[in-house]
Image (cartoon, grey):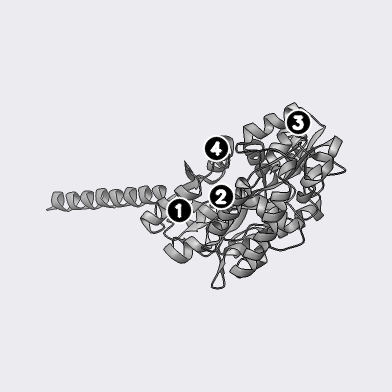
Amino acid sequence: MARSSCSTRKHAVLLSAALATSVFASAAAAEELRLITWGGYAPDDVVAQFEKETGIDVQVTLSNNEDMISKLRATGGAGFDLAQPSQDRIVGVQRQFNIYKPIDFSRVNTDQLQPAMVKATQESTELDGEYYGVPSVWGTSGLIVHNSVADVVQDYTDLCDPAVAGEVSYRLKRPTLIGFAFAMGMDPFAAYDDRDKYQSILAKVQEKLIDCKDNVKTYWTGGDQLLALLRTGEVKAAMAWDAGGWKLNAENPEIRFVAPESGALGWIDTFAIPRRSENEEAAYKWINFVMQPEIAARITNESGNFTASKGADEYVKPALRDAYRESFDEAAINNIKWYPPVPPGLETLEGQVLDTVQAAN
C-alpha cells in the first residue's frame, strides 16, 4: 500500500514536471518575432543585439510590397508578427482584405520619431478613424544636379530651362508627372478624389513635358544607367532618388541631391501589425528598439536610406550624413510631398499621358 502511494506520488511529480516543461516550451516558442521586411532594414548586428537584450528570437523574411500583400492576404493576416509595407500600400489593401490591425500608439515611443513623418504616415494609413502604420524608413525623389547648373535647376520644371538643353534626364513615370504638377503650382494629390480635376492637371503637365522634350538627353529607365550619365557629365541635371544623389556626391562633391523648391516627393516604409500577429508585444519592442537613434543609424548605413528616427543622422557615416544635411534642412523635410494611396483608375490616366509624351515629336 505504501509502495502504491509512493508510486502515485512519483507519477504526479513526473506529470507536474512534464506539464511545466510543456508550458515553458510554449512560452519560449511564443517569444519569437516573425518580421517580413525589405533588404537592409534588419541588419544582422541589429537583430543580434535585439535578441541579446530581449531574449526574443527574430525570424526575418525579406520581401517587397507585392509579396507582403500576397503572403498576408493568403493567410488572412497570419504568419508574421510585424510587416513593413509602404505607406501608400496599406489603406486600399486593408479595406479590401482586412490583413492588418490598428496601431496602438500608446505602445510606440513617438518621442523618438520625427513629428512630420508620424503625421504623414497617420494621414496616409488612416481608415475609419484608426491608424495602421508607424513611420520607419523613408526616401524621396527630387533633383540631382552638377554644381555648374545648380543656380539654374532648383525645381522640376527648371529641367526645361534652355540653359540645360540636352543635358537633362528623367523617367517617363508617375513621379515625373507629380513633380512637374507641383512645380507648376498645382496640387495633384489634393485632386486624387476628383477625376476630372486630376485629368485637367495631367493635361497641363503633358503639354509641358512635350515642350520639354528637346531638353532631354534621354529618358532614363534604370538607376545604373542614370548614374553613368551623371558620372560622365553627359547629363548635368536629373530627376531621381536621393540615395543615388548621395552616392554620386561621395564620388564627386560637384554632384549633389537637391530638394526641389516645390518639395521632394516622399515615400515611407512603415511598421504595420498583421491582423493575426501572435506576438504583438515583440512587434512593439522591435519598433521602439530600432527607432533609437544609434540603432536607426545602423539601418541607414546598411540600406542607404534614412529613417524616421529623430537625431539618427548624428550617428550615420559622416559622408552620408553630410550629404543628407546639405539636401534636407528642417524646412525641406517639412515640405516633402508624401505619396497618398492611389485611387483606382488614376494610374490608367497617367499611363495614357506618359504614352502620349513618349510618342510626341
Mark 1 is on which residue type? Ile
Observer-nearest of 134 and 331 = 331
Structural crowding at the residue carrying mark 3, measured as other residues with C-alpha within 10 Å and reported as few (<14), some (14–19) or many (≥20): some
Query: Can you tell which quarter of the image residue 78 is in?
Result: bottom left
Q: Earlier in the sequence, mark 4 or mark 2?
A: 4
Q: CA distance from mark 2 to mark 1?
A: 21 Å
Observer-nearest of 33 and 128 = 128
**39 w.r.t. 355: above or below:** above
Structural crowding at the residue carrying mark 2, measured as other residues with C-alpha within 10 Å and reported as few (<14), some (14–19) or many (≥20): many
Q: Which mark is residue 48?
A: 4
Q: Position of residue 299 (x, y in %)?
A: 63, 41
Q: CA distance from mark 3 to mark 4?
A: 30 Å
Q: CA distance from mark 4 to mark 2?
A: 12 Å
- Residue sticking out furthest to the bottom: 128
Tell me whether the residue at label 4 lies in contact with that at label 2, contact meaning CB atoms closer than 8 angstroms. Answer: no
Comparing labels 2 and 1, the label whose residue is closer to the camera: 1
Q: Earlier in the sequence, mark 4 or mark 1?
A: 4
Q: Position of residue 185 (x, y in %)?
A: 77, 61
* SS assignment at label 4: helix
Mark 3 is on which residue type? Ala
* Residue under label 3: 250
Residue at 36% across / 51% down in the picture?
26
Observer-nearest of 322 and 252 = 252
Q: CA distance from mark 3 to mark 1?
A: 36 Å
- Residue sticking out furthest to the front: 361
* SS assignment at label 1: helix
Please indicate whether residue 343 sits to the left or right of residue 149 in the image: left
Q: CA distance from mark 4 to mark 1?
A: 27 Å
Observer-nearest of 238 and 291 = 238
* Residue under label 2: 286
* Residue under label 1: 69
Q: Earlier in the sequence, mark 3 or mark 4?
A: 4
